[in-house]
Image (tube, helix red, strand yellow):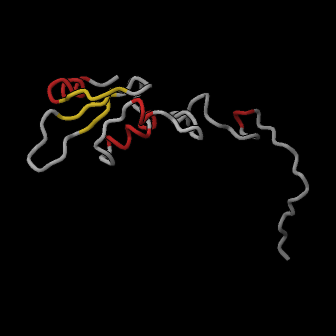
Amino acid sequence: MADIGTRLYTWLNGEKVGEDQFGNLYYRGKKAANGQRDKRWVVYKGEPEASKVPPAWHAWLHYTTDILPTGAEQMAKPWQKEHLPNLSGTDLAYRPPGHVLSGGKRDKATGDYEAWRPE
């Protein structure tokens, strides 16, 4: 949820240009200063987390492309996985075997490790 300052700025100066599959809204400035690029920004749905921005919209936000992402650009290639936001710090974060929060039990060593001993 955007704070009141962002909402006011967006209402006064923003032109909505699109929305992604996560509900994030994308804007550009109504007027660009002479010789400058237009401002571009995102208003996140829910918690503001930059990793929630899909690659096609990231490219537009960072002026890699001036073409607005449409359904065709957002379609995944057969080899691509679905975009996931950063899950660090959540219950869904990856925890390797042996991690304290995953039970703390590691598999026994397989015997291919030999500890170094100084002579």
Q: In this view, does 11 lie above or below 84?
A: above
Q: Where is residue 94 in the image (x, y as percent from the top left)?
A: 64, 37
User: Looking at the image, which residue is at 48% across and 33% down?
Assistant: 75
Depth order, front residue of 93/24? 24
User: Looking at the image, which residue is at 87% across and 50% down?
Assistant: 109
Q: Residue furthest left?
A: 34
Q: Where is residue 110 in the image (x, y as percent from the top left)?
A: 89, 52
What is the quadrant of residue 21 in the picture? top left
Q: Which residue lies furthest to the right in this view?
A: 111
Depth order, front residue of 69/11? 69
Q: Position of residue 5 (x, y in %)?
A: 22, 27
Quarter placement of the C terminus: bottom right
User: Looking at the image, which residue is at 15% across and 48% down?
Assistant: 36
Q: Position of residue 79 (x, y in %)?
A: 59, 41
User: Looking at the image, which residue is at 28% across and 43% down?
Assistant: 66
What is the quadrant of residue 68 in the picture? top left
Quarter placement of the N terminus: top left
- Left or right of 64 in this view: 97: right
